Image (cartoon, rainbow, N blue to C red):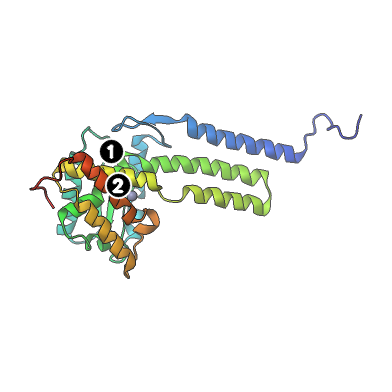
Amino acid sequence: MPRSRIPKGRVPAVLIRLGIAVVIALISIVGYFGAGSANPVTGQTQRVAMSVEQEIALGLAALPRMAAQYGGEDRDQRDQQLVDRVGETLVRAIDSPTPWRFEFHLLADPQTINAFALPGGQVFITRALFDRLQTEGQLAGVLGHEVGHVIERHGAQRMAKQKLAQGLVGAAGVAGDGRSAAQMAAAVGNLVNMSYGRGDELESDEWGVALMVNAGYDPRAMIVVMEILRDAGGGGGKAEFFSTHPDPENRIGKIEDAIGQHYPNGVPDGLVP
Ligand SMILES: [Zn+2]
């Protein structure tokens, strides 16, 4: 028997490891690309890691920890009610019935300027951002953007991508050894942990504008929100918003385009500022 031939029944360990890695990678890729589902509102087929019911359950499960991270629910009932009312007005302005359970929360954090949404409909704005807003329309701009993330299921999509990444990272860990595997894991992890990405943010801005228009708010308030965020970024405020959202300056042009599509002859008078 020639020496180079592998004895029957004995496959080199490196090939076994490589085989396992390929299988893990294939499972995660098939899992990612195989599971498409139609969005209940937009009708688009999306890669999401979970059902709407699971999204809602996950959002509710994460709610207490998320709120605690930003100082808990704000105690000012009047402001809290304003956030609720504007949020619910926007939800009613969605053209088709939605399966999500929307709830709006003003969180007490006075320093961190941010707003975010969990899958399923839990929407948050911090006291620090709330206090920088001057009109109800601006609040509608912030909340409408977050409602857009929920409708487009960006969180569930991101989690589907992370599941893919986890599989690939696992595969890297099995196939490689030591540092190279860790580096590959870090690279893949970074790739998908970069918040929602520019496309998702612009999509949510478009939803924000659309819902403001449907609800009777002046959508130009959304542009003012971008200016407020831009100015906050330069000041002493801790604008966490910037680590998860594209530069407000770059978003203003797109928002103006969206407003032009809703109002080709100019924004009419009498809208809620
Ligand atoms: Zn966003």
- Does the numbered disc 2 mark a residue whose Cβ is under 8 Å from ligand 1? no
In the rendered view, tell whether residue 225 sits above or below residue 212: below
Q: Is residue 163 visible?
A: yes
Q: CA distance from mark 1 to mark 2?
A: 27 Å
Side of 177 where 187 appears, left or right: left
SS for callout 1: loop
- For disc 2, the marked residue is 254
Q: Quadrant of the N terminus?
A: top right
Image position, residue 100 (x, y; %): 28, 38
In the rendered view, tell whether residue 158 sits above or below residue 34: below
User: Of marks 1 and 2, which one's residue comes earlier in the chain?
Assistant: 1
Q: Residue type at mark 1: give it.
A: Trp
Q: Is residue 122 visible?
A: no
- For disc 1, the marked residue is 100
Q: Estimate how packed mark 1 is, as few (under 14), some (14 to 19) or many (20 or more) residues with alpha carbons within 10 Å.
A: some
Which residue is painted at 34% across and 43% down in the image?
119
Which residue occupies the extreme left position in the image? 270
Between 61 and 99, the one nearer to me in the picture? 99
Which residue is painted at 47% across and 41% down in the image?
161
Image position, residue 68 (x, y; %): 33, 59
In the rendered view, tell whether residue 225 sits above or below residue 8: below
Which residue occupies the extreme bottom position in the image? 236
Which residue is painted at 42% across and 30% down in the image?
36
